[in-house]
Image (spheres, rainbow, N blue to C red):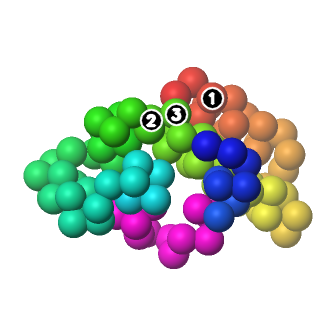
Amino acid sequence: MERGDITMLCNIESGNITLLLSRITGAEQTEIEQMLMNGTNPAEVADHYGKYDEFNAFFKSNIISKLNALINNNEISVSDANRFLDQIAKF
């Protein structure tokens, strides 16, 4: 997945994991929704379609964007943001 693709995905309404997974995997939303309703978690859905790395990259990019906004609004320090990023880097 290219950087521009990740940016496009960031415009998906927050919480619409079905649409996000559909865009990343190319699968129909109804198929994704059924998997989620059957208890498959979103990362497993992405992995099922061979798109785990793209799914993971999207979330890390989205988190970095949110952290930058918090830093810019003086709601979190850079060192706190870096500690948080260190934690998510383990995943």
Q: Quadrant of residue 40?
A: top left
Q: Residues within 10 Å of mark 2 (few under 14, many from 20)?
A: some
Is 5 left, or right, of 67 in this rendering?
left
The structure residue drawn at horizontal position 30% and vertical position 44%, both measured from the top left corner, is 45
Disc with the residue nearer the chain's start (3 vs 1): 3
The CA distance from mark 3 to mark 1 is 13 Å
Element under label 1? loop
The structure residue drawn at horizontal position 38% and vertical position 59%, both measured from the top left corner, is 22
**Where in the figure is residue 4, as x and y percent of width and height?**
73, 55
Outermost residue to the top: 90
Dividing the image into 4 quarters, which one contains the N terminus? top right
Residue 63 seen by the camera: no
Is 57 left, or right, of 66 in this rendering?
left
Outermost residue to the bottom: 13
Cβ–Cβ below 8 Å for labels 2 and 3? yes
Q: Amino acid at mark 2?
A: Tyr
Whether residue 31 appears in magenta in the rendering, the answer is no
The structure residue drawn at horizontal position 41% and vertical position 49%, both measured from the top left corner, is 25
- Count of marks overlaid on the render: 3
Residue at the spot of label 2: 52
Q: Amino acid at mark 3?
A: Asp
Which segment is the magenta one? 9-21
Residue at the spot of label 3: 53
Residue 71, numbered label: none
Q: Residues within 10 Å of mark 3 (few under 14, many from 20)?
A: few
Judge depth for marks 2 and 1 and give the one in front.
Answer: 2
- The residue nearer to you, when weighing 38 against 29, is 29
Residue at the spot of label 1: 89
The CA distance from mark 2 to mark 1 is 15 Å
Element under label 2? helix
Element under label 3? helix
Q: Amino acid at mark 1?
A: Ala
